[in-house]
Each structure stands twice: as C-alpha cells, then as structure tokens.
Image: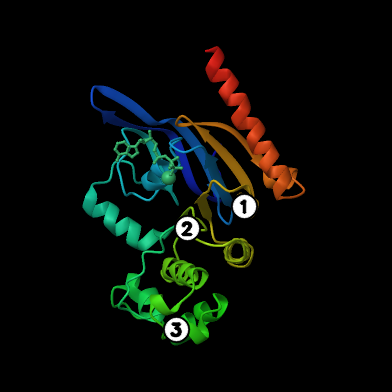
Amino acid sequence: MKSDNRTLEIRSLEKYYSHGEQKIAALDGVSLAVDKGDFVAIMGASGSGKSTLLHLIGGLTNADRGEIIINGTDISGYGDHDLTLFRRNHLGFVFQAYNLMPFLTAEENIKLPLLGKKVTDSQLEKLLDRLGLKDRRHHRPDALSGGEQQRVAIARALITEPDVLLVDEPTGNLDSVAEEDICQLLRQLCDEQQCTIAMVTHEPAVAFAADRVHVLSDGKIVDSFATSECDNEAELAVKYQQIVHQQKQLTKTR
Ligand SMILES: Nc1ncnc2c1ncn2[C@@H]1O[C@H](COP(=O)(O)OP(=O)(O)OP(=O)(O)O)[C@@H](O)[C@H]1O
Ligand SMILES: [Mg+2]
C-alpha cells in the first residue's frame, strides 16, 4: 500500500556474505515500512542481521536484491558517490561507540557533518539546549560522561535535519540511568520533532521507547508488534522471548 507519509520503505531486501565455500544470507527477503515520525525498533539474536539491515538502509553497504526507498528515492541502485551524497543530506547515524573526534569539542563534533556549511546560531543553540549540552559545548569527549557523549553523537546526527535517524545499539556502553536518559530523549525527539527513527537493540527496555518492534531471525522479519500492546518493559521482554522461543521450535521441526 502506498502512503504519502511513508519515509522509509524496504522491499524484499537480500544480502549474502561468503564464508569460505558457504554463502550466508544475512538478510533473506526483508520488507518493512516506516511512516514519518514513527520510531521502530529492530530486535533479534546476535547474527540475525540487525546491523546488516541498518547498514543497507544507511547506504553503507549495497544490497544483492530488493529496494530501499527513502522519502520516495530508491537508493538500492546507487553507486558509492551518490550514496555518500545521499547519506550526507538525508540520513543521521548514531552508533554504540559514539565515534566522536577526540581532539574536537562537543560543539565542533556536532558541527562536523555540516562540512563548513553555516547553521544559524539559533538552530545550534536550540539543538544544544534540547540535548542538554549547553554547558558542555566546549568540553572534549574525554571530559564527558558516556551518556553526554552519546547525546553529542545524537546532536551531530540531527544537525543536518535528516529524513531518518539510524541508531545501532545506542545504549550498549551505558549504565541503566544513562540508558533511560537516551531512550527518553529519542522518544521525545520523535514526539516533538517528528523524527523518524530506526533503531537496532538487544534490550527490551530500550525497545520499549519505540512505537513498534520488528523481530529479525536468520535474516527474516518473523514477527512485529506495537509496543502499546505491552504495559511495561517486562511485558515487552516476555513477548520478545516468546517470539524467539517459537522461532527456535519452528527451526527445530524444519
Ligand atoms: N562484512 C561481513 N562479512 C561476512 N559476513 C558478515 C559480514 N557482516 C555480517 N556478516 C554475517 O551476517 C550475519 C548477520 O550479521 P549482523 O552483523 O547483521 O548481525 P547482528 O544481528 O547485528 O548481530 P549482533 O547482535 O551480534 O550485532 C552474521 O552471520 C554475520 O556473520
Ligand atoms: Mg549488530
């Protein structure tokens, strides 16, 4: 079904890797649609294909088959040059290992993706304020906590006003207090600014911040549910475990 509000659409995506003689399907026909302002979490066991999916959406690797349509543009046939331009103008990335430049201040890190392009002072101030970084702007990463570094990374991803924010295990290096802070922040960015977010996580507590959870297993989306079906994180954890367990049983009987 076509929706004008659709920011991201993935159709029958396939990606293979060779391991010696063996060809492994990291993604085996994944289809997914995300509307503007939606926040989706992609969960799955280690090796299920989560990062591969995010890297393909982000144009960091090419698919072997299928389509990735972002705001009406199919990037699946793009070469390296076009992908780089597309990434710069339309996508924001947040990774587990913040990936900040150690010799630059928080503010300089945030402005990096602008590549010298000017941003108005009020835009920058608004972002620093929204991310709670105003009094940290002149600190280098080694003088910031993990949670603050991740907030700098989120600000850096948002400064270009991307169509989609791609987030891979954002809280993997954080304690539970900072984890909660980052989850709340992503949720609020979605609610207040209609950010469209696709996030990979192992953690049910983190996935609970999203609107919808898609479960990957062996390169396929095997189930999806709205987080509103769960009253709390614990219920989401149980639901997720049930899906994983069911999937294991199915694989055994195959
Ligand atoms: N560059 C690569 N070369 C070869 N195989 C790869 C490559 N990247 C991923 N794979 C394989 O593809 C499959 C999916 O990997 P992927 O990294 O997407 O899993 P994941 O769900 O992100 O796992 P994790 O939770 O451990 O991060 C795995 O079998 C992995 O070994
Ligand atoms: Mg991964």
**Colour scheme in the image?**
rainbow
Q: Say above or below: 53 vs 247.
A: below
Q: On the rendering, which quadrant does ligand 2 occupy? A: top left
Secondary structure under the numbered disc 3 in the rendered image: loop
Q: Secondary structure at mark 2?
A: strand
Within-10-Å neighbours for mark 3: few <14, some 14–19, many 20+: some
**Residue reaching furthest to the right:** 231
- In this view, the residue in front, 73 or 117, is 117
Q: Amino acid at mark 2?
A: Leu
Query: What residue lies at 53% left-to-right and 44% top-to-bottom?
Result: 42
Q: For residue 225, which quarter of the picture?
A: top right
Residue carrying label 1? 210
* Residue denoted by label 2: 165
Read off the residue under disc 3. 137
Q: Amino acid at mark 3?
A: Arg
Q: Residue furthest top?
A: 253
Q: Is residue 190 above or below residue 230?
A: below
Which residue is rendered at x = 44% and y = 86% of the image?
121
Q: Earlier in the sequence, mark 2 or mark 3?
A: 3
Real-space CA distance between mark 1 and mark 3, rounded to the nearest whole angstrom: 28 Å
Q: Which of 253 and 73 lies nearest the eye of the viewer?
A: 253
